[in-house]
Image (tube, rainbow, N blue to C red):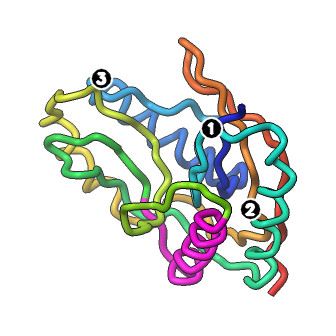
Amino acid sequence: MRRLFWAVELPSASRSAMADVVRHLRPRVPEIRWVADGNIHLTLKFLGSTPDGQEAAVIAAATSVAARFSPMTVSLKGIGAFPSPRKPRIVWAGMSGETASLASLSAGLDKVFVDLGFEPETRPFSPHVTIGRARKGESTPSLEAHLARFDKELGPAFTIEEIVLFHSDLTPAGPLYTRRGSAPLRG
């Protein structure tokens, strides 16, 4: 079994911009477990535990969906928290640009994978990049005070030309992500 998910890899300029944000927030909001620079990505569909023999079908299914979409241009914009900055579970960077197309891509992936027996997504897709996770039940009053500083574009716009299948290994030091395949946007 492999723990798999489909995502958008961020270009180095965007990862660098997110690393700058985290470097600013880490000492000011120590209650948050900040995501390692190399692990920052945009998740489109989490599949979870997947039998090794099903990986080829997973790639084929995503490739059929991705082929219907043209490359899309987006940028990272603003920092926020789900469900709220005072009691966050997730600290995120938002997205601007062709986010409606990105949501349609995510919905297409969800549908094709439900047809293959994977669990459907229960929450509406909200394009974001997770940059931190709160420890369970901990409030973070200091986070809200720092969010306004990041209400603008966070790095240059970039074009999504492919989606990537990742295998996630959970370790005590944090998750390790390994690229397993990709599917180009060809529409």
Q: Secondary structure at mark 3?
A: loop
Whole-Å distance between the Cαs marked 3 and 1?
Answer: 31 Å
Task: Based on the picture, tell me whether residue 125 belongs to the magenta stretch.
Answer: no
Amino acid beneath label 1: Ser
Amino acid beneath label 3: Pro
Residue 92 image position (x, y, % from top left): 40, 50
Whole-Å distance between the Cαs marked 2 and 1?
Answer: 19 Å
Span highlighted in magenta in the image: 94-115
Q: Residues within 10 Å of mark 2 (few under 14, many from 20)?
A: many
Along the polypeptide, which appears first: circle 3 or circle 1? Answer: 3
Q: Is residue 98 above or below residue 141?
A: below
Which quarter of the rendered picture does the N terminus lie within?
top right
Q: Which residue position is annotated with label 2?
A: 163
Residue 138 image position (x, y, % from top left): 17, 27
Label count reads: 3
Q: Residues within 10 Å of mark 1 (few under 14, many from 20)?
A: some
Q: Which residue position is annotated with label 1?
A: 49
Amino acid beneath label 2: Ile
Residue at the limit of the structure toward the top, as seen here: 172
| Predominant SS of the magenta segment | helix
Q: Is residue 44 above or below residue 17?
A: below
Q: Secondary structure at mark 1?
A: strand
